[in-house]
Image (spheres, helix red, strand yellow):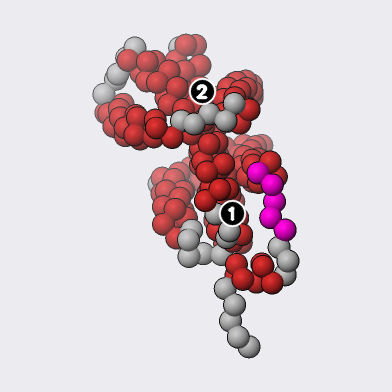
């Protein structure tokens, strides 16, 4: 049996290319699946008390967090070589791991505060993504600023483990919110760019959709965490 590249098989089977609107909707649907999986696992871990068993294991949360980091790096580095199914599986695996971590947040902050922060995050994220889609914002030029800002936030985040940043940490929360709103606009624009770039390669187009869903998922999660920190600081 002769081997045919996947893209040729798509063409041989009369593959019907989806529209940009369908592609954007599918990408956001995968992001939603990831968030839903994270929410279900985190709530289940909190209600059943399963998260206590993770805490009972020495370095349990650190191990889960390490697995998250490895999963994201592996998916980013290997997405061109893995199948579409494998890419989707890795994304959902990451979302499941994140659900374990978020169970701990329910213990720390409580259900009411988590729900309030989720609603605020969904509102801010939805507005920024909607504006980017409706007005077709081209913010590709701010990528260096976003990348530089991300590195700075990581550095200050590490410093906050060792020293008390005081009121400066509140400013960092506002900066983090602004940063990931910027990433939301940028990553939303990348969906359109990927659609144009990979329109002749259905397999790469599908994998780019998964990667965009992961990027938007991370934007939402980080935006959530900075709003949560800000709310917690204002109450304290």
Q: Identify the element where label 1 is drawn.
A: loop
Magenta residues: mostly which secondary structure?
loop
> Whole-Å distance between the Cαs marked 2 and 1?
39 Å
- Going by the image, does 200 lie left or right of 47? left
Residue 144 visible in the shown view = yes
Vertical order, 229 against 184 (above or below): above
The mark found on residue 215 in the picture is none
**How many C-alpha atoms fall within 10 Å of the one at disc 1: few (<14), some, or many (≥20)?**
some
The mark found on residue 228 in the picture is 2
Residue 100 visible in the shown view = no
Residue 228 image point, x, y percent: 51, 23
Vertical order, 65 against 158 (above or below): below
Q: Which residue is mark 1?
A: 199
Residue 161 image point, x, y percent: 31, 30
Q: Identify the element where label 2 is drawn.
A: helix
**Which of the two labelled residues, at mark 2 and mark 1, occupies the earlier sequence position?**
1
Vertical order, 149 against 77 (above or below): above
Q: Quadrant of residue 174?
A: top left
Q: Over which residues does the magenta segment extend?
A: 16-20
Q: Give the position of the N terminus as an image quadrant.
A: bottom right
Residue at the image point whose x is 56% and y is 48% from the top:
196
């Amino acid at each position: 049996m002769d081997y045919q590249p996947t893209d040729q098989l798509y063409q041989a089977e009369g593959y019907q290319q989806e529209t940009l609107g369908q592609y954007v909707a599918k990408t956001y649907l995968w992001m939603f699946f990831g968030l839903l999986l994270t929410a279900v696992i985190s709530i289940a871990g909190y209600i059943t008390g399963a998260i206590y068993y993770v805490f009972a294991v020495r370095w349990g949360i650190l191990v889960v967090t390490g697995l998250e980091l490895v999963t994201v790096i592996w998916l980013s580095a290997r997405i061109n070589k893995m199948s579409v199914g494998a890419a989707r599986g890795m994304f959902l695996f990451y979302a499941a791991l994140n659900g374990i971590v978020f169970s701990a947040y329910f213990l720390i902050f409580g259900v009411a505060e988590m729900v309030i922060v989720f609603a605020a995050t969904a509102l801010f994220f939805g507005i920024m993504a909607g504006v980017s889609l409706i007005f077709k914002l081209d913010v590709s030029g701010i990528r260096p600023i976003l990348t530089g800002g991300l590195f700075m936030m990581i550095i200050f985040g590490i410093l906050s483990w060792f020293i008390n940043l005081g009121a400066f940490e509140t400013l960092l929360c506002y900066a983090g919110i602004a940063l990931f709103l910027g990433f939301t606009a940028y990553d939303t624009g990348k969906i359109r760019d990927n659609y144009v770039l990979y329109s002749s390669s259905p397999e790469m187009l599908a994998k780019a959709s998964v990667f965009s869903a992961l990027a938007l998922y991370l934007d939402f999660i980080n935006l959530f965490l900075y709003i949560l920190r800000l709310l917690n600081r204002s109450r304290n």
